[in-house]
């Protein structure tokens, strides 16, 4: 992990794409929050799972669905990150869904803001999962491995 000061306005993302197609992870985006990120200040972890509803011939999300996901992500980032209430830290893309991982300061505030962002458009194919993770163990279990592995590549 770097010494990134974790300024959400200037995120440092790492993108890892799987070279072979199978039933597992295809793409992972990880925000490098830095070695000194205060996980205890963001103890609530939310997973927003978007089930793909419009697939193209290769079984990937259609262009229209990709646009809807991008617009949703941008709207949610604007609502959540304006005052640092929550931070998008990982995005997993798998064959049937995309999963957005958020770290939040407060459980009810996150849910209220999610409802506000959802009201910006049509009903979305998402489900929400929540866990308290005061040490950032979920994030660290993925991010540390990914970022360290990339540093080792020539």
Image (spheres, rainbow, N blue to C red):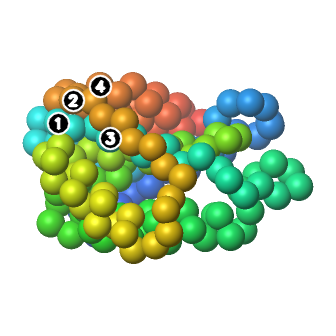
**Tag in front: 4 or 1:** 1
Q: Are marks 1 and 3 in contact (CB under 8 Å)?
A: no
The answer to whether residue 122 shows anywhere in this view is: yes
Q: Which quarter of the rendered picture does the C terminus lie within? A: top right
Q: Which residue is mark 2?
A: 132
Badge number at residue 46: 3
Crowd band around label 1 with a 10 angstrom C-alpha radius: few (<14), some (14–19), many (20+):
some
Task: Please tell me which of labels 2 and 4 falls first in the chain.
Answer: 2
Residue at figure coordinates x 15%, y 66% from the top left: 83
Residue at figure coordinates x 44%, y 30% from the top left: 142
Residue at figure coordinates x 68%, y 53% from the top left: 53
Q: Which quarter of the rendered picture does the N terminus lie within? A: top left
Q: Which residue is mark 4?
A: 137
Residue 9, how many percent across, how many down? Answer: 28, 69
Badge number at residue 43: 1
Q: Is residue 43 above or below residue 85?
A: above
Residue at figure coordinates x 70%, y 40% from the top left: 95
Task: Please tell me which of labels 4 and 3 falls first in the chain.
Answer: 3
Q: Secondary structure at mark 2?
A: strand
Q: Is residue 43 above or below residue 65?
A: above
Q: Secondary structure at mark 1?
A: loop
Task: Please tell me which of labels 2 and 1 falls first in the chain.
Answer: 1
* Figure quadrant of residue 129: top left
Task: Please tell me which of labels 2 and 3 falls first in the chain.
Answer: 3
Q: Work out how far the residue at label 2 is from the one at label 1, CA to CA, in angstroms.
A: 6 Å
Q: Work out how far the residue at label 2 is from the one at label 3, CA to CA, in angstroms.
A: 9 Å
Crowd band around label 2 with a 10 angstrom C-alpha radius: few (<14), some (14–19), many (20+):
some
Q: Are marks 4 and 3 in contact (CB under 8 Å)?
A: no
* Figure quadrant of residue 13: bottom left
Q: Is 135 in front, or is 108? A: 108
Left or right: residue 4 versus residue 91 is left
């Amino acid at each position: 992990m770097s010494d990134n000061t974790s300024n959400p306005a200037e995120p440092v993302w790492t993108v890892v794409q799987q070279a072979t197609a199978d039933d597992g992870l295809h793409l992972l985006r990880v925000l490098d929050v830095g070695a000194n990120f205060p996980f205890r200040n963001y103890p609530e972890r939310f997973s927003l799972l978007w089930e793909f509803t419009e697939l193209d011939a290769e079984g990937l999300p259609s262009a229209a669905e990709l646009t809807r996901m991008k617009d949703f992500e941008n709207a949610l980032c604007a609502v959540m990150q304006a005052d640092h209430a929550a931070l998008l830290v990982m995005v997993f893309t798998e064959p049937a869904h995309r999963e957005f991982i958020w770290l939040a300061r407060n459980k009810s505030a996150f849910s209220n803001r999610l409802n506000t962002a959802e009201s910006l458009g049509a009903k979305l194919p998402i489900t929400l999962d929540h866990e308290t993770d005061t040490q950032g163990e979920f994030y660290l279990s993925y991010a540390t491995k990914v970022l360290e592995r990339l540093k080792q590549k020539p």
